[in-house]
Amino acid sequence: MHDLLHPLTDADVELIEIAKNKIKQRYRRRWHQLAAAMRTKDGKIYTGIHIDAYVSSLAVCAEQVTLGTALTEGEVDIDTIVAVRHPKPESEDPEVRVVTPCGRCREMICDYGKDAWVIISHEGQLMKTKAINMLPEKYYLPGINKGN
Ligand SMILES: [Zn+2]
C-alpha cells in the first residue's frame, strides 16, 4: 500500500478542514456523527453529513450524501473526497478525525470516480490514494460503464 500513498496538497488540507467544520456545525449525537467534503476537478466543493436512523441499517453515509448533492448539481468529476468523524461527547479524544470510507462508499466512489483521490489516515499519518487502490478486483457489470 505504501507505494500507492501520496502526500496531501494544501487544497487537500483545506478540504479536511471543510469536512471538520461541517460536522462541528451539524453534529447531533446518534443522528449525524460524520461529514464528508468533496472537491471536483474544476474546484467546486460539496459537503454532506451522514444520516442515521432508528433502524441503523437505514443509515446513509456522509460520502454518499455528498456525492448525491454533487450529482444533483450536475457534477460527476470527483477529484478528492474525505470523510471525518466527530467524537462522542464522553470520548477521551476530542478531535474530529479523518476516517476511511466503508466498503459501500468505496464502491460508490469508484463507480463515479475510479481515479478519484481519497484522503485516509494511514498509520497515523494523513495521506491520499486513488479510490480504486482501496478496492482491488472491484465489481463491474460487463458492458456497463457508469460514471467515468
Ligand atoms: Zn460509507
Image (cartoon, rainbow, N blue to C red):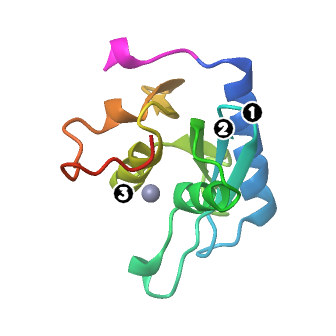
Q: Is residue 75 above or below residue 14?
A: below
Q: Amino acid at mark 2?
A: Thr
Q: Amino acid at mark 1?
A: Gly
Q: Quarter of the image containing the N terminus?
A: top left
In percent of width and height, residue 72 lies at 65, 62
In percent of width and height, residue 130 lies at 43, 28
**Which residue lies under the disc numbered 3?**
104
Mark 1 surroundings: few (<14), some (14-19) or many (≥20) residues within 10 A = few
Q: Is residue 139 above or below residue 49?
A: above
Q: Which quadrant of the view contains residue 35?
A: bottom right
Q: Is residue 126 magenta?
A: no
Q: Which element carries disc 2, helix, strand or loop?
A: strand
Residue located farthest toward the bottom when viewing the structure as drawn? 54
Task: Answer whether residue 87 is visible to the viewer in this image.
Answer: no
The answer to whether the residue labelled 3 contacts the one labelled 2, judged by CB atoms less than 8 Å apart, is: no
Q: Is residue 138 left or right of residue 77?
A: left
**Which residue lies under the disc numbered 2?**
40
Q: Is mark 1 within 8 Å of ligand 1?
A: no
- The range drawn in magenta is 1-7
The answer to whether the residue labelled 1 contacts the one labelled 2, judged by CB atoms less than 8 Å apart, is: yes
In percent of width and height, residue 23 lies at 72, 57
**Which residue lies under the disc numbered 1?**
43
Q: Which quadrant of the view contains residue 98?
A: top right
Front residue of this view, candidates 9 and 33: 9
Q: Is residue 15 above or below residue 129?
A: below
Q: Is residue 53 left or right of residue 56?
A: right
Q: CA distance from mark 1 to mark 2?
A: 5 Å
Residue located farthest toward the front when viewing the structure as drawn? 143
Q: Amino acid at mark 3?
A: Arg
